[in-house]
Image (cartoon, rainbow, N blue to C red):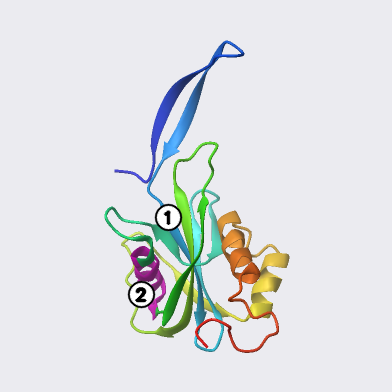
């Protein structure tokens, strides 16, 4: 089974009296995790993506497995992809992925107080490099288009706009 199924809908607009075919990509909900180490560095993953045939800089992310709670998926994906475990995990926001053509939601989490707990537990097809960046470096990566994945920009923006972000450069607000 793949990540997506496609539903074809035959829709009729009663006022305009026209019919159109619409296609909906159906998939499970996703999680995305902005993760910070105990010393406030961002835990990022670099991996090859077939859609663009390029390497991308991302926050840890993945599908929510059937029967799994979003928070459980966030913790699992963070630990599998990076080997880091969070002290605290908080939901930043739940958003529609792309309501025009997709049925799913993305749950964005903030993981703080992360420390290296074990080795990565990657799926056979995954090859993920874990990198740590300061706040200033993350901003430079965004401004320089080194981070250009829209979902990742959304995740980082949600963090920077959240009350958990400490723009003063001091210790993190969250978990203190």
Residue identified by numbered label 2: 120
Please tell me which residue is depicted at 56% across the width and 63% down the height of the picture: 155
Q: Left or right: 172 with respect to 38?
A: right
Q: Nearer the viewer, mark 2 or mark 1?
A: 1
**Image: 7 above or below 17:** below
Tell me if mark 2 has few (under 14), some (14-19) or many (20+) residues whose alpha carbon lies within 10 angstroms of its own: some
Q: Quadrant of the N terminus?
A: top left
Residue 137 position, x and y percent, is: 66, 77
Q: Earlier in the sequence, mark 2 or mark 1?
A: 1
In the rendered structure, which segment of residues is drawn in magenta?
Answer: 72-84
Please tell me which residue is depicted at 55% across the width and 61% down the height of the picture: 56
**Image: 77 above or below 50:** below
Residue 73 position, x and y percent, is: 36, 63
Residue 122 covered by magenta stretch? no
**Magenta stretch mostly in which secondary structure?**
helix
Residue identified by numbered label 1: 30
């Amino acid at each position: 089974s793949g990540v997506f199924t496609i539903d074809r809908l035959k829709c009729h607009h009663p006022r305009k009296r026209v019919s159109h075919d619409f296609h909906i990509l159906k998939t499970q909900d996703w999680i995305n995790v902005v993760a910070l180490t105990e010393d406030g560095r961002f835990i990022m993953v670099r991996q090859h993506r077939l859609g663009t045939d390029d390497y991308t800089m991302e926050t840890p992310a993945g599908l929510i497995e059937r029967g799994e709670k979003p928070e459980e998926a966030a913790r699992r994906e963070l630990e599998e992809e990076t080997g880091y475990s969070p002290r605290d995990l908080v939901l930043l926001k739940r958003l529609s992925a792309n309501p025009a053509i997709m049925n799913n939601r993305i749950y964005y989490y903030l993981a703080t107080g992360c420390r290296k707990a074990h080795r990565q537990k990657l799926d056979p097809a995954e090859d993920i490099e874990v990198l740590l960046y300061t706040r200033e470096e993350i901003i430079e990566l965004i401004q320089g288009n080194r981070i250009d994945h829209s979902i990742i920009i959304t995740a980082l923006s949600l963090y920077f706009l959240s009350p958990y972000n400490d723009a003063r450069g001091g210790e993190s607000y969250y978990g203190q």
